[in-house]
Amino acid sequence: MTPDDLDLVERVTQGDQAAFGELVTKYQTPIYNLTYRMLGNAGEAEEAAQEAFLRAYTRLNSFDRKRAFKTWLFSIASNYCIDLLRKRRLIWLSLDEPIPHHPSLVDAQAGPERSAVQAEKSAAVQEMLGLLPPKDRLMVVLRYWYDYSYDEISETTGASVSAVKSRLHRARHTMANNIKEGNAVALTAMLV
């Protein structure tokens, strides 16, 4: 039986650095996937994921034990990504540049043809996400990739539940319009 997150956090605060390694191992793929979906660049996503873990480690004493560790960690990672996106003020993905895929985003058991189709779909979805403002993109990623409830998204982002619902509605509307207007290259064919 693996120790739960709170036990691991307690061990870390008592000086057990290996316990933090267990937290990193447990959450490295979900955090990478979040940062990748937010930033759309594998290299930046890896750096953002590392920075999120570093920030979590250095701020562990401020972690509210009443919250879920996963929610707190996702909040750190998503806020860091939003800060990066604000700094570069670029939310459009280059259509000329292929989007690299991370092995965890493609089924390892799939054959070459299926893997290629999955990679194309992943690139199409990433392109669609790139057309959304950073905060809307975060809401979509948390809701549809991580199956967060509205309450969990609210807790992670600090937005009210009604604001979460509103942003998700707006994001879905924007994505539908982009497909309808052809702004997202080949998305309709990829997602069908």
Image (cartoon, rainbow, N blue to C red):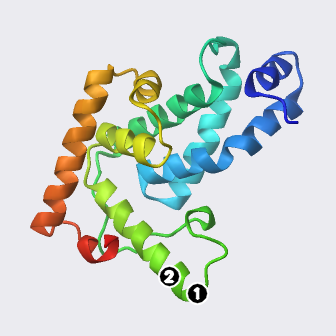
Q: Quadrant of residue 130?
A: bottom left
Q: Is 89 in front, or is 186?
A: 186
> Is 124 left or right of 179, judged from the image as shown?
right
Whether residue 154 is visible, yes or no, is: yes
User: What's the mark number on residue 70?
Assistant: none
Q: Amino acid at mark 1?
A: Pro
User: What's the mark number on residue 112?
Assistant: 1
Mark 1 Cα shell of 10 Å, populated few (<14), some (14-19), many (≥20)? few
> Is 21 left or right of 61, judged from the image as shown?
right
Q: Is 15 in front, or is 184?
A: 184
Q: Is 176 in front, or is 49?
A: 176
Q: Quadrant of residue 96?
A: bottom left
Q: Amino acid at mark 2?
A: Ala
**Looking at the image, which residue is at 42% across and 30% down?**
153
Residue 179 position within the rendered picture, expressed as x and y whole percent measured from the top left:
18, 64
Residue 97 position within the rendered picture, expressed as x and y whole percent measured from the top left:
37, 73
Residue ID for mark 2:
116
Q: Is 2 in front, or is 61?
A: 2
SS class, disc 1: helix
**Looking at the image, which residue is at 50% across and 29% down?**
75
Residue 30 position within the rendered picture, expressed as x and y whole percent measured from the top left:
60, 47
